[in-house]
């Protein structure tokens, strides 16, 4: 199994080494191994967990709730990210109240995603049509048909 140093994990996730160290200090990430010299090493699943934390933070999830979600995931998965079918409630070091908070947050996120999914996909298609090769194509106000952000088709009057 391949292990990442703090710097390698940060590079793979697109964050700074200091961010990884900060998240480790807060208990959001825990090293899977520590060398005799004290160097932290992270397994492959740590990269996924780090990306999950970054996504959760981008969605506005507080750090304590993100930490609980990571704790739950670590308790139910192996170092390589394989789901452990043999886990028990005793393996999860969270109180029932913490699990209720995690569950409530996950439901809110899923509901919000469901409400936004179609609009986000449509917005992505709209932007994709207008941006090619990194160059911005100017919008042509004289176009005969133009899809708007809300999916309607506008036709030139005249």
Image (cartoon, grey):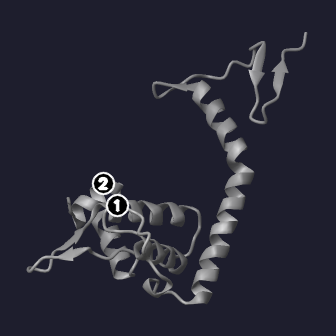
Residue 24, position as x, y percentages in the image: 33, 77
Residue located farthest toward the top when viewing the structure as drawn: 158
Q: Nearer the viewer, mark 1 or mark 2?
A: 1
Q: Mark 1 highlights which residue? A: 47
* Nearest the eye: 11 or 76: 76
Residue 119, position as x, y percentages in the image: 72, 43
Judged from the image, the secondary structure of the residue bearing numbered disc 2 is: helix
Left or right placement of residue 117 versus residue 26 in this view: right
Q: CA distance from mark 1 to mark 2?
A: 7 Å
Which sits earlier in the primary sequence, circle 1 or circle 2?
2
* Nearest the eye: 111 or 12: 111
Residue located farthest toward the left when viewing the structure as drawn: 37
Residue 97, position as x, y percentages in the image: 62, 88
Judged from the image, the secondary structure of the residue bearing numbered disc 1 is: helix
The residue lying at 30 percent from left, 69 percent from top is: 18
Q: Mark 2 highlights which residue? A: 12
The reply to whether the C-beta atoms of the residues labelled 1 and 2 are less than 8 Å apart is yes
């Amino acid at each position: 199994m391949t292990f990442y140093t703090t710097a390698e994990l940060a590079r793979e996730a697109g964050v700074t080494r200091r961010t990884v160290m900060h998240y480790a200090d807060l208990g959001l990430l825990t090293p899977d191994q520590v060398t005799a010299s004290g160097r932290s090493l992270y397994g492959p699943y740590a990269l996924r967990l780090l990306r999950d934390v970054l996504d959760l933070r981008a969605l506005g999830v507080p750090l304590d709730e993100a930490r609980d979600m990571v704790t739950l995931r670590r308790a139910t998965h192996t170092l390589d990210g394989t789901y452990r079918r043999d886990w028990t409630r005793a393996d999860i070091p969270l109180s029932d109240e913490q699990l209720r908070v995690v569950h409530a947050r996950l439901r809110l996120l899923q509901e919000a995603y469901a409400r936004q999914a179609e609009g986000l996909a449509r917005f992505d298609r709209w932007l994709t049509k207008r941006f090619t090769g990194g160059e911005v194509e100017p919008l042509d106000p004289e176009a005969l048909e133009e899809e708007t952000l809300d999916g309607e088709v506008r036709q030139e009057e005249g």
